């Protein structure tokens, strides 16, 4: 039998990032618009897709201020 692939641990950053991507879809935001709302480059978005551990509260707060979404919506989904 082969080895099982390593699973990415579920972290609060991963949950929040997944919900940010969900709201990006629901709000019909482009990657450029999302990166502007976070105050990062589009390349950083792809970095967050692989590892959201560098997603800061400052970036999340910026996104919340731009979109009007409540923090609980990013945590609970």
Image (cartoon, helix red, strand yellow):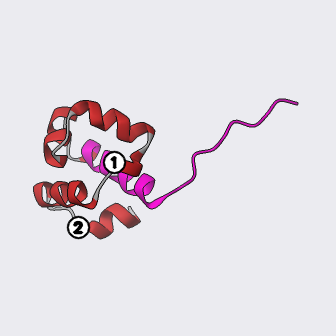
Percent x, y for residue 3? 79, 34
Q: How many labels does the image show?
A: 2
Is 42 situated above or below 18?
A: above
Magenta-colored span: 1-25
Percent x, y for residue 41? 20, 35
The verdict on residue 24 being magenta is: yes
Q: Residue 70, which numbered label?
A: 2
Q: Residue 59, which numbered label?
A: none
Percent x, y for residue 29? 19, 39
Residue at figure coordinates x 22%, y 54% from the top left = 59
- Give the quadrant of the C terminus: bottom left
Residue at figure coordinates x 19%, y 48% from the top left = 38
Percent x, y for residue 46? 34, 33
Residue on which disc 1 sits:
22
Task: Identify which residue, 67 or 45, lies in the foreground.
Answer: 45
Is 13 situated above or below 52?
A: below
Which structural element holds mark 1? helix
Q: Residues under labels 1 and 2: Cα distance?
A: 14 Å
The verdict on residue 14 being magenta is: yes
In the picture provided, is 37 more to the left or to the right than 7? left
Which structural element holds mark 2? loop
Q: Earlier in the sequence, mark 1 or mark 2?
A: 1
Classify residue 67 by image quadrant. bottom left
In the picture provided, is 66 more to the left or to the right than 48? left
Q: How crowded is mark 2: few (under 14 residues within 10 Å), some or many (20 or more)?
A: few
Residue at figure coordinates x 36%, y 41% from the top left = 48
Q: Residues within 10 Å of mark 1 (few under 14, many from 20)?
A: some
């Amino acid at each position: 039998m082969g080895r099982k692939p390593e699973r990415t641990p579920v972290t609060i950053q991963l949950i929040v990032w997944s919900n940010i991507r969900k709201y990006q879809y629901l709000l019909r935001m482009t990657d450029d618009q999302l990166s502007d709302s976070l105050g990062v480059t589009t390349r950083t978005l792809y970095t967050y897709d692989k590892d959201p551990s560098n997603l800061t509260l400052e970036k999340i707060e910026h996104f919340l201020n731009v979109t009007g979404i409540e923090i609980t919506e990013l945590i609970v989904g």
